[in-house]
Image: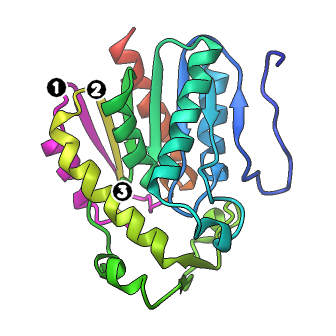
Amino acid sequence: MGKGATFVSTGKGSPQPFFYEGDRRGLLLIHGFTGTTAELQPMGRFFHEKGYTVHAPLLAGHGTSPEEMAMTGWPDWWSSTVEGYKKLVQYGCQPIYVAGLSMGGLLALKLAHNYEVKAIISMCTPIYVKDRRIYLTPLLKRVVTYSPRTEEKEFHIEQSIFPYDRTPVCCIANLYDLIRRVKKRLPDITKPIFIAQGHRDETVKPKSAQYIYEHIGSDVKKLVWYEKSSHIITLDHEREALFRDIESFIHSLDP
């Protein structure tokens, strides 16, 4: 693979994995539940321009169809995350930073607990979600197959994403299971962490960020609130400020 980034132009970004070659500093980007790598492309470009090697894998069952997603669960999404990490290792990246949006933040936390990473970037990561039906999904999945998508994002976000029109309820139950597992392990995670949370998050209860900050075992931790940002913070109005804040945090660890 030659030096430099390969960008796929589709008019609204691409839901496919991307690997932007740079120096030995590796950044693994993990997208959210039912999302794709498109929601992370601006962040990927920002850090590639700073010299980083950036990789965003596409999680199993995502960017395809609801039917294909229904055949996957959190162990499959976890395997995709580990494969992405190993790709950066094979490229020779050291150190490796891991950043995750929404469910991607849960997977980033789990990765930091199981593998060697320099720091964690947690963005709008769910511990508490606003739709209380998630707590019923272990039972609902037996009688309901899909949950329809009922609300669109703001235009500047909607035009850049590739959402499913319905979500497999069994996968929502898997997300709930993953939340519980990661929540339980927070005290055992000790890597430096930057926690970003949008005040206008329509999906995750913002108190999730405070919970992570208070319960994670990290000595080095920073929580930053973004007043004008919603759930997909990497595409929202304050994304450039977010990227700069993350860059500053990483730089503070290794000037």
Q: Which residue is identified by label 3?
A: 227
Q: Which residue is identified by label 1?
A: 219
Q: Report the colour scheme.
A: rainbow
Q: Which x, y percent locates residue 243?
A: 50, 36
Q: How many marks?
A: 3
Q: Is residue 152 rendered to the left or right of residue 74?
A: right
Q: Is residue 11 rendered to the left or right of residue 216?
A: right
Q: Which residue is identified by label 2?
A: 192
Determine if the magenta segment contains residue 225: yes
Name the element at disc 3. loop
Quadrant including the C terminus:
top left
Q: Are marks 2 and 1 in contact (CB under 8 Å)?
A: yes
Q: Is residue 19 rendered to the left or right of residue 146?
A: right
Q: Earlier in the sequence, mark 2 or mark 3?
A: 2
Badge 1: residue crowd in 10 Å (few <14, some 14–19, many ≥20): few
Question: Which residues lie in the magenta part?
Answer: 202-231
Q: Is residue 233 rendered to the left or right of residue 196?
A: right
Residue closest to the eye, 64 or 7: 64
Q: Earlier in the sequence, mark 2 or mark 1?
A: 2
Distance between the alpha carbons at the discs numbered 3 and 1: 26 Å
The residue positioned 71% from the left and 27% from the top of the image is 20
Badge 2: residue crowd in 10 Å (few <14, some 14–19, many ≥20): many
